Amino acid sequence: MSGLEDLPPLRDTLAAHDLLAKKSFGQHFLLDLNITRKIARLAEVGPGDRVIEVGPGPGGLTRALLETGAVVTAVEMDPRFEPLLNELAAAADGRLSLVIADALTVDETSLAQGGPAAIVSNLPYNVGTPLLIKWLTGAFTPTSMTLMFQKEVAERIVAPPGSDAYGRLAVIAQACAEVRLVMDAPARAFTPPPKVDSAVVRLKPRADRPAPALLTALQTVTQAAFGQRRKMLRSSLKVLGGEALCVVAGLAPDVRAETIGVEGFLALASALIARRGD
């Protein structure tokens, strides 16, 4: 680890490369190594574990992950950080690979070289939710995800039925993974400080994760149900079967989406598959 220990402080590295955060990329840098090391601990990664990190920026979290002994593949969209991250890679004994690409389009299975990998990221604010949906519902299933979001988004992921924050994101996330909010991060922890606080969510894929066809149907019914969340299910799901669909799923058609638990939405998704198969 001596190479990592010899690296200059992140603020000095950013100044040396004359780098500032880009608002258009949703960039807010985590430069406090105490915070990034805590995230690395929460991720429960260690020597030899493969990690995919999205949006490393100047490499604060990357350093903390490398300190654990993990093997990191960092996906960065902003080519300005390539020289800085290459310096970090040179100090990391071959345990850091850099991919300059859009994380929404990369193939995680290829990045993980066909093996298991965790995803640990301080996600860019403007792509956090679509990336999470991709990782929850796509072909690649990470061993775990430890992700920093805007706090409002984090609360939507872990929200229980009946709460104001409960919606489509909670249903899909909780159908696919065990979810926990494990850490808060105030805006002042970032450079530049965002206008909102952040939080870290830990997601562990469920052993009974829905099959692809059921997941597709789940996305369809949740989009319809929460797209008109003030309406009763018989109305919001009218184009998918309305009251008849609810009856097959064993749900009262006069309830609203925010009162239905994950199992209820999975029942609606199963009913939709059966209906379309008729």
Image: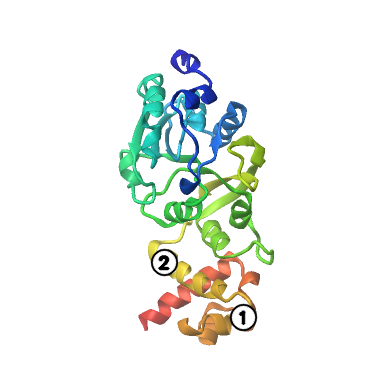
Give the residue pinned by disc 2. Answer: 216
Residue 266 shows which numbered tag?
none
What colour scheme has been applied to the protein in the rendered image? rainbow
Q: Is residue 226 above or below residue 143?
A: below
Residue at x-position 56% and y-position 67%: 263
Q: Is residue 107 left or right of residue 14?
A: left
Q: Amino acid at mark 1?
A: Lys
Earlier sequence position, callout 2 versus callout 1 = 2
**Residue pictured at 53% horizontal, 57% vertical:** 173
Q: The residue tagged with tag 1: helix, strand or loop?
A: loop
Pick the front one: 215 or 81: 81
Residue 57 can be seen, yes or no: yes
Camera-side mark, 2 or 1: 1
Along the line of sight, the residue nearer the viewer: 180 or 106: 106
Residue 271 horizontal/vertical position (percent): 47, 77
Rate crowding at label 1 as few (under 14), some (14 to 19) or many (20 or more) other CA atoms within 10 Å. Answer: some
Give the image quarter of residue 256.
bottom right
Of the 4 image quadrants, the one containing the C terminus is bottom left
Q: Residue lying at the far bottom in this picture: please name it.
A: 244
The label on residue 231 is 1
Q: Amino acid type of disc 2?
A: Thr
- The mark total stands at 2
> Residue 78 location in percent, x, y?
39, 40
User: Circles 2 and 1: CB distance less than 8 Å?
Assistant: no
Q: Is residue 95 above or below residue 30?
A: above
User: SS class of the residue under badge 2?
Assistant: helix
Image position, residue 221 (x, y; %): 49, 73
Percent coordinates x, y for residue 201 in the rendering: 58, 46
At 39% across and 47% down in the image, what residue appears?
103
| Of residues 124 and 61, the one drawn nearer to the viewer in this rendering | 124
- Kindly tell me whether residue 68 is visible in this rendering: no
